[in-house]
Amino acid sequence: MTSSAVSEIHATASEREGLAEVTRLVVANGSLVRLTVGDSEVELPPSLVALITAGAGALERGDALAVVSEEVEVSPSEAAKLLGVSRQYVDRLVAKGVLPVRRLPQSRYRKISARSVLDHLAVKESKREGIASILDAAEQAGLQ
């Protein structure tokens, strides 16, 4: 993804080795993290510490991270990457009205609110978790 609205981050193999140490240090110190740059020191807010910890864990596993502001609009291709689906599938979601789009004036280009994409992703994850819990309950009840 190349737009300024969405940044994709990958870690090299050598970087992944150090990420485990970052996560371990943050967990060991709770949410208190101090950053020293030159002669200046600042305590990072808990929200940034949570972001660093979550990001370090994902990168350590070899996952790529997509960083996107909820307030921006993305192209259908960028929406597809965020959702982990094809651009054609995003086109079908748009056609069904699941993802609202805005057409750029005097153009065929379309933009989708990143908030809409993230909301759709949350619904998808919620459904997936619900199905998994139903399957777990059925297995525990001996129905499988």
Image (cartoon, rainbow, N blue to C red):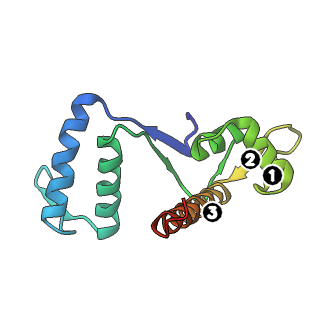
Kindly report which numbered mark, 3 or 1, lies closer to the viewer in this rendering: 3
Crowding near pointer 2: few (<14 within 10 Å), some, many (20+)? Answer: some
Kindly report which numbered mark, 2 or 3, lies closer to the viewer in this rendering: 3
Q: Do the residues labelled 2 and 3 touch (CB within 8 Å)?
A: no
Image location of residue 5, percent across then percent down: 57, 46
Horizontal arrangement in the rendering, residue 132 relative to residue 104 (left or right):
left
Question: How far, Cα to Cα, is label 3 from label 1?
Answer: 22 Å
Image location of residue 133, percent across then percent down: 51, 66
Question: Does dot 1 land on a helix, a strand or a loop?
Answer: strand
Which quadrant holds the N terminus?
Answer: top right
Which quadrant holds the C terminus?
Answer: bottom right
Q: Which quadrant would residue 51 be assigned to in this image?
A: bottom left
Question: How far, Cα to Cα, is label 2 from label 3?
Answer: 21 Å
Q: Are marks 2 and 1 in contact (CB under 8 Å)?
A: yes
Q: Which quadrant would residue 69 be assigned to in this image?
A: bottom right
Amino acid type, callout 2: Lys
Horizontal arrangement in the rendering, residue 74 relative to residue 5 (left or right):
right
Question: Does dot 2 land on a helix, a strand or a loop?
Answer: strand
**Quick check: can you spot residue 35?**
no
Horizontal arrangement in the rendering, residue 10 relative to residue 1 (left or right):
left
Q: Which quadrant would residue 47 be assigned to in this image?
A: bottom left
In this picture, is 37 found above or below 123? above
- The residue under label 1 is 102
Amino acid type, callout 3: Val
- Residue ID at (59%, 42%): 84
**Quick check: can you spot residue 95?**
yes
Question: How far, Cα to Cα, is label 2 from label 1?
Answer: 5 Å
Question: Does dot 3 land on a helix, a strand or a loop?
Answer: helix
Q: Residue 123 carries which label?
A: 3
Image location of residue 113, percent across then percent down: 69, 55
- The residue under label 2 is 111
